[in-house]
Amino acid sequence: MNTLVYADVTEVQTSGASSIASTMQQMSISFGVATASLVTAVFIPDRFHLSAAEMIHGIHGAFFVLGGLTVLSTVIFRELKSTDGDTASQHKILQHAGYTSVPDNTVQSR
């Protein structure tokens, strides 16, 4: 996904795109930590009076929910088109230069 950030960016815009992408990554990490904290707080509401077994059970529940949220977040990839990232993948450049890619991801001359 990180490569797709720069797929349609000109060289002039690269610095700004890098700053925005870095900021978005940091914000995503922050939101992830906050979400994990909130979900854990739901499963462990009274952490001072719980036994170790109850605490572990609550953490397992939180991990299960967070795993489900992670799987659910992959839905965004359905929005990608087969042509997204072509400028970054160099498929067109290799085809125009007389090279073809083969199934094992190597490049052969025609």
Image (cartoon, helix red, strand yellow):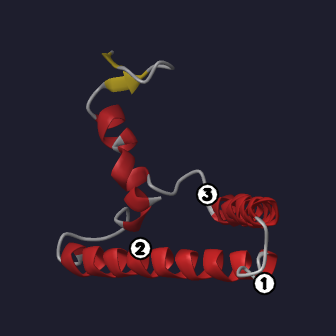
Q: Position of residue 12 (x, y in %)?
A: 17, 76
Q: Nearer the viewer, mark 1 or mark 3?
A: 1
Pointer 1 or 2: first along the chain: 2
Q: Quadrant of residue 55?
A: bottom right
Crowdedness near tag 3: few (<14), some (14–19) or many (≥20) residues, C-alpha within 10 Å: few
> Relative to residue 105, is residue 71 depicted above or below?
below
Marks 2 and 3 in Cβ contact (< 8 Å): no
Asked which secondary structure carries label 3, the reply is loop
Q: Quadrant of residue 109?
A: top left
Q: Nearer the viewer, residue 86 or 36?
A: 36
Q: Which residue appears at 19% of the width and 76% of the height?
A: 15
Q: Nearer the viewer, mark 2 or mark 3?
A: 2
Residue with the mark numbered 2: 25
Q: Is residue 23 left or right of residue 28?
A: left
Asked which secondary structure carries label 2, the reply is helix
Q: Which residue appears at 41% of the width and 73% of the height?
A: 25
Pointer 2 or 3: first along the chain: 2
Q: Nearer the viewer, mark 1 or mark 2?
A: 1
Residue with the mark numbered 3: 81
Alpha-carbon distance for marks 1 and 3? 43 Å
Crowdedness near tag 2: few (<14), some (14–19) or many (≥20) residues, C-alpha within 10 Å: few
Residue with the mark numbered 1: 45
Q: Is residue 108 left or right of residue 68?
A: left
